Image (spheres, rainbow, N blue to C red):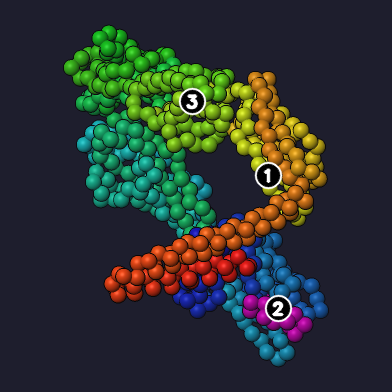
Amino acid sequence: MHLLGSLVLFATILRQVSGLETVVGLYGQTLEIPCNKGAMKAEDVLITKWKYDKGDGLSGDLLVRKKTENVSISATDEYKGRINMAANSSLLLSSAKLSDQRTFTCMMVVGLDINEYPVNVVVYKAPAGVEISDKAQELEIGKLAKLATCVAKDANPPANVTWLKNNKPLVDGGKGISIRASVQVDPVSGLSSTSSTLEYSATKEDTDAQFSCSARHNVGKELASSALTFTITYSTENIVLQVIAPEPLVEGDNVTLKCVADGNPAPTSFNFHLKGDVVPVKNMNTYTLTHVSRDTTGEYQCSLIGNPAMMASKDVTVNYLDINLSPSGNVVKTAGEALELSFQIDSSGDSKVSWTKDNVKMQKEPKFNKLKFSDSGRYESEVKMGALSKKAFFDLVVEGAPVIKQLSKQRSEDGQHKVLICEAEGSPKPSVSWSINGTSLDESPFINGKVTHKITVVPTVNLTVSCTVSNEFGVDTRDINVSSHQSEDADQTKLVVGVVVGLLIAAMVIGLAYGIYQKKSKQGSWKTGEKENGSSEEERKLEEKVEENSQKAEV
């Protein structure tokens, strides 16, 4: 709780108990005691006077101020030189001390009325500090003994003292715990000192325990003593081998073997068992393996020199990850060839492999049975084993003579021009040329060995246009026929005439066939009535077909 909050809370409690307004001050500081909470207007007050309760029904005058005069100090005792009056009629009391804890009364004369406003004063003081004395030299396991005494000096009211072990409070009456507290008051200052003595029954786990004490008070922050540790003697019962190494441990790192025993005083000499070799180490409990390799992997032990049967062991695992990619670096091949990849992994555990081409993830390891220009790019493999990872790459360039994959034409959007499109593959990037000059030249970016070149032309006559692509490995040429607009219109007219003539000829053929059929029908009139009816149906269908073709011919 903050200082101001503590003072306000305590003042509220005192008001509830005594019925008087209470002001809380801090020891040694200036205290302002309000008169009627400053509710009176200064111009309405004729006389303001302060006095204090001396006890036994007696009061002592402190000072007085008349409306048109300055403050007159009448105190001749301990308050002389320590008091003054503020502009709002509050009493200012400097160097507050415990003897100031009494009732001060403000008397005001307003017109014919005389009013008194008593105020109770309480003075707080936080402890000057926390000290530990009478520290025990050592502790014996299982025996209740005095550990130390903690003192919180010069406070008002007395401070509360708490003992702690490893920053956790100890409670009187707990297992192996006895705490006795007492308070002493200074006869001169009236300040209180709290003493707390801790008796403690130690256990083996208290070897490195830190004991301390703290003091809490109504004002000021919590005070804490420095931490203490105690010597607790017992024989060695357990031994542990610790492996201190980077994570993950890889080849070239150093590994420290540390032998820890629970005896107190702890053993200082050990034997380290290094895969068949025994190395004694005196006055130290560590041994370092430098520049470890995969052959270092194995079990290691340590034991007491004086008691070899007391031994601890630990496994050491050196992680390694080797990869070999062939080919690597820059690889130049010819289109159509095969490229065989060799990728080997040697690791101490399970690994995962991933591939990318030009930083785009691939679904599987690349295979090149017949290289294409689009296979060019940077291929990178990454192998991960836990926190370890390694990468390898090769830059593949597929070269070869250019090939025109497609030569096409189309009308422009306005229908007035022809757009010729030449699509080619090759590497290095082929140059593109045309047998005629065009406008609006447009070339796509050279990606995956492909390039597309467009020109716009307005042919006035029918002509043949050639697209030629070339690089240092060869040349390829392809032709395309381009007709003029007039020629295309004439071709369309010829097409319509041809269709009409074709329909007329078809009509004539059907008519001829119908006449022959009629002739044969008359010669075969001796057949039964059913056959005659059938022939009539066939005649009707032929007539409909002739009529239909005649209509098409007219169109």
Question: Is residue 514 found inside the magenta-colored segment of the image?
Answer: no
Checking the image for residue 409, the label placed there is: 1
Q: Disc 3 to disc 1, how far (Cα)?
A: 31 Å
Disc 1 or 2, which lies upstream in sequence? 2
Question: Could you tell me if residue 101 is visible in this image?
Answer: no
Pointer 2 residue: 48
Foreground disc of the pair 3, 2: 3
Pointer 3 residue: 370
Badge 1 local density, few (<14 within 10 Å), some, or many (20+)? some
Disc 3 or 2, which lies upstream in sequence? 2
**Measuring 20% from the left and 15% from the top, which residue is drawn there?**
307
Disc 3 or 1, which lies upstream in sequence? 3
Checking the image for residue 313, the label placed there is: none
Farthest residue in the left direction? 309
* Amino acid marked by disc 3: Lys
Which region is colored magenta?
Answer: 36-49
**Measuring 67% from the left and 24% from the top, which residue is drawn there?**
475
- Residue 230 position in % (x across, y down): 34, 32
* Amino acid marked by disc 1: Lys
Q: Label 1, secondary structure: give it.
A: strand
Whether residue 520 is situated above or below residue 302 in the rendered picture: below
Q: Disc 3 to disc 2, how far (Cα)?
A: 112 Å
Question: Could you tell me if residue 114 is visible in this image?
Answer: yes
Q: Label 2, secondary structure: give it.
A: strand
